[in-house]
Structures are given as C-alpha cells and as structure tokens.
Amino acid sequence: AEFDLADSRFYWGLRLAYGHHLKSPPVDLYTLLPRWGFFLVHPHRSPLPGRLGISLDLEGILSIADAQDTGWEIGITPLLKFTLPVTRGLHLFLEGGAGIIGENFSSPAVPHAFNFTPQVGVGVDYALASTWGLTVAYRFRHSSNAGLYKENPAFNVQFFQVGIIHFY
C-alpha cells in the first residue's frame, strides 16, 4: 500500500505502549497514547532535502503503573515530528518534546506527583491504505520535577509503541 496524502493536512493516531524504568526499583507502565497533529511542512510536497516533513503533535498519556503498588499517570505533551518518506508507503520519523505529567504510584523513583517529561523517539509509519498506517516506535522519556523540590531522582523509561495513524 502507499500513502496518498495530497489532500491531508491533519492526522490523528492511537498508540499502545509498554514502558520499563531503566533503574531499580522496577516500574512497568502500560500506556495509551492518543494523539493529534498537523503538517507544518508536508512530507510529500516538502522543499527540504529528502522531502523532509515537519509536523506538530499533541499527545495525551494515560498509563497504568505496576510498581510497589498499582497506580496511574496522566499527562500531555506537545511534540515536533520530523518525517522522512523513504517510499510512498514507508515513512521514518524522529519525534521529541516535553510535557507535564501527574503520577500517582508508590515508588522511590517518583517521589512527587507532578513532573516534567522531556522525551525523544524514533519510529516508522507503514501504509495500510491510502490514509491509514501502522506505527511502530521506540521512545526514551525522562521524568523529573526540574528542581522544584530538593528530592529529584531521575525516572527514566524506555517505551515500545505500536499503533495506528489516520491522515485527513
């Protein structure tokens, strides 16, 4: 299949993710990531080298956390996404941003409920139909209170994501 994005300016997607804290104590996250975005530079009409596309995304996060107890996290993150169309049916991307998150679970890795979440990831959008795609991605996320409180351990998580994207 190939993407036919000539008339598309916007997109929405939904990713499922599994995240794992990179240090001890163990924390596992089971995450839902709804997202909406729009092209700043369209990847199929881009004047940039390699037809590089640039878009702005807004992504929500809702996770169930398996730590010392079961808890949750909820937040929102604006992201910049750089898309390189390898073919009309395969787009590689790099995305990054920083958001805010409320975390409610018991772990020494997360001593405060309010944190900031700088993050970066890579992935691929694979065409399933002209305006539908399958997304597979990896993301690294750092979560901390940015020095607002004296106690500020790093909560670093790697996420493996899979989802769908629809262009319109």
Image (spheres, rainbow, N blue to C red):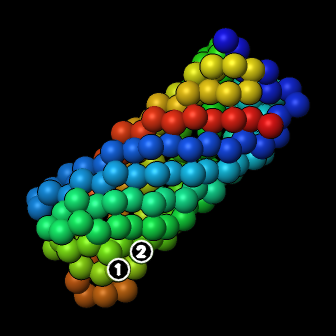
* Residue 141 in picture, x, y percent from top left: 37, 55
Residue under the image location 35 percent in, 67 percent down: 72
Residue under the image location 36 percent in, 39 percent down: 160
Question: Which disc number belongs to residue 73?
Answer: none
Up-down relation of residue 67 to residue 51 (above or below): below
Left or right position of 6 against 91: right
* Residue 163 in picture, x, y percent from top left: 51, 36
Residue under the image location 40 percent in, 44 percent down: 17
Circles 2 and 1, Cβ within 8 Å, touching? The answer is yes
Crowding at dot 2, Cα within 10 Å, few <14 / some 14-19 / many 20+, comes out as some
Identify the image quadrant of the C terminus. Answer: top right
- Which image quarter: residue 73? bottom left
Residue under the image location 88 percent in, 31 percent down: 7
Circle 2 residue: 102
* Residue 82 in picture, x, y percent from top left: 62, 38
Question: Which disc number belongs to residue 113?
Answer: 1
Identify the image quadrant of the N terminus. Answer: top right
Q: Nearer the viewer, residue 13 or 95?
A: 13
